[in-house]
Amino acid sequence: MSTTPTAIALPALGRPFPLCLPASLWSAALALRRRRPYVRHSRAPDLSYEFSVSRDRIFRKLASMSVPKKDIEPDIEIVEEDEEATLLPAEEGDAKDRLKQGESSLAVGRAAILDAAKHAPSQPGVYRMIDARGDVLYVGKAKNIKKRVTAYARPTGLDTRIERMLASTRALEFVVTRTETEALLLEANLIKRLRPRFNVLLRDDKSFPYILITSDHWAPQILKHRGARTRPGHYYGPFASVWAVNRTINALQRAFLLRSCSDPFFESRTRPCLLYQIKRCSAPCTNEIDFNEYALLVREANAFLSGRSKAVKDELAGAMEKASRALDFERAAVYRDRLAALSAIQAHQGVNPRGVEEADVFALHQQGGFACVEVFFFRTGQNWGNRAYFPRADQSISPGEILGAFLAQFYDDKPCPRLILISHDIEDRQLLAEALVTKSGHKIEVMVPRRGEKKDLIEHALANAREALGRKLAETSSQRRLLRQLAETFGLPRVPRRIEVYDNSHIQGSNAVGAMVVADAEGFRKRDYRKFNIRSTELTPGDDFAMMREVLTRRFKRLLAEAPLSSVAIAEDQPRGHEPGEGAPIILPSPESDATQDESPWPDLVLIDGGQGQLNAAREVLAQLCIEIPLAAIAKGPHRDAGRETFFIPGRDSFKLPPRDPVLYFVERLRDEAHRFAVGSHRRRRMRDLREAGLQEIAGIGPTRKRALLHHFGTLKAIERAAVTDLMQVDGISAETARRIYEFFHEGTA
């Protein structure tokens, strides 16, 4: 007689589950086990799993039931297709009922948190607070999620910022991790991806430039690199500015004589280039140096940039002495020049610490409701520059809390040095260090220096933070004043909080691109820029009006889809259930009516680079979509003279502004930025097509002349930059052909 197993392990319970259940309940348990949980999964690779409240609750209920002695099946009917409705939490419905009953939104939020806390896990992890629209309000980490979430429901002791957050909360989601360190890393990742309104946000997060010494060629190249590190090689940085990278590369070329040319240029050389003549390259392209000697130069450069600068200098000094004793004075002079170049790299550059080989220095200063974090980078004992950040944070948040959140996001996608110096202590300093060690794989120390040279570095960074924040406040004040004047000049209903500027760029309709730039009280918001590749095949080539219609239609259709209708105010005469395009217009609310509008994607002014025709095209699009937004167009003056622009606004006659009017300068700056972005996007698209089609797109250029041009200049980029006289130096290129090549790259851009 075979034995039947008495228990099975179910993942939702983590313990043996009794098989001796009534058949109907056992069927229900298996059905629930096969079902997907209703909670959205935000699974981090190899370190978390989503906590499903409803399924866990049902399995625990089944596990705790007493098993009847007789096999009597209760009258239960399981309906698979209706399970989702029965499993969804009741918090949303309860919240609506409570609001209808007159309870305050804060009380409703606390009730939702208490309901979620009952089923929260008592483990490390990350929690997300969700509002009624499903947007994430806040992402936080905790050693014990249940205790942390329960603490939010306290009736007293919370500051205004927390109370505003709780008042908007309608649901919570949890992600459990194995350790608190993993929770910290996941929290930083989710904050950068979701950008919650109540978290400290790292606003300026453009990539840093690095120095790259490649390893995918027998003669490695040294070059500046920005972006994803996909090319094989050794990356050194970050540098605070491109200028610092270029300066360092120039000095390294003099010290190590590494090539900086591209691979096609390298392969096409038949004689050394100018860099060899001025002693900034060893010319491996023409075998002026053998493979072993060049490999030694590469190893020395990698060692120097890795922090072993003293050992490299000692080796060069020893080689120079040896050459001198052998009376090989020319070779000794080469070593002498390389030593001088290394000394120049390590010379005084403002602040160069003697006892700090590799470190990042962070100093925070708060003033006027704003915060500035100044970051200095030190590598190989050198100051590699600094950069100021202005994180978005409520003024009630302490400096230590801002700095802790900033550091976690800052190192989410950047390499960590072995020493991090900070101006204010943070609560989870040791936890942050452990998380960075886990991420980077080497020892990292996070410290607040109290004396000595490291303290001097912090003081220097604090002074720079104060100066940077002072400049930022002055610029912001000036920008807000200009926005107020703009509202008065254009007759806007309120001071614009967000301005979107649109422009098109093309050459006789080819490679047409539309561009949108965004500006607010703090300047240009480059992370919100968008470009639109014109897709329609029915457009007449060069039809600017049709291109503008396509760009605006795509932009605002997507905006209507992404921004919930609950976030815009519908006109009072509009019937319930109205959809865009069926009647009365949608009117955007004023920012004062709702705090959430501070980060609304809806513009308060749309500015078109063009005249009355472009303005009419924009009005048609917005009318078709039933959207009412203030519109304006700026047309260039006669002969494209700056200062003589004409403005067009619906319902008003066209007008000009006085030549010295600050509003005119401000609008010109907006227009010029949109033009720059549009032209740049168009040129990149055209160059990509040109690379695919080849130089044969230019009249008079066939395979032979194309080959001659590439042999002479090495790359297409060099051909684009060449002057007419330089192009004429190529065999087979006449003056007329050189002029056509030059005009192809430089003229005719709309």
Image (cartoon, rainbow, N blue to C red):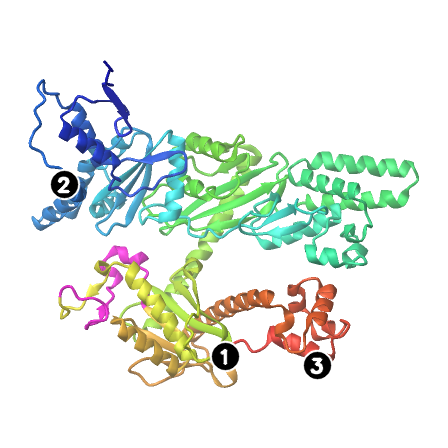
Front: mark 1 or 3: 3
Q: Circle 2 sits on which residue? A: 79
- Farthest-out residue, front: 1
Q: Secondary structure at mark 3?
A: helix
Q: CA distance from mark 1 to mark 2?
A: 72 Å
Q: Circle 1 sits on which residue? A: 642
Q: In this picture, is 161 found above or below 7? A: below
Image location (x, y in percent) of residue 665? 45, 73
Q: CA distance from mark 1 to mark 3?
A: 33 Å
- Farthest-out residue, top: 1
Q: Residue at x 44, y 72 (%)?
A: 503
Q: Residue at x 36, y 34 (%)?
A: 48
Among the two numbered marks 1 and 2 on one chain, the one whose residue lies closer to the N terminus: 2
Q: Circle 3 sits on which residue? A: 736
Among the two numbered marks 1 and 3 on one chain, the one whose residue lies closer to the N terminus: 1
Tag 1: Cα neighbours inside 10 Å, few (<14), some, or many (≥20)? few
Q: Is residue 636 left or right of residue 729?
A: left
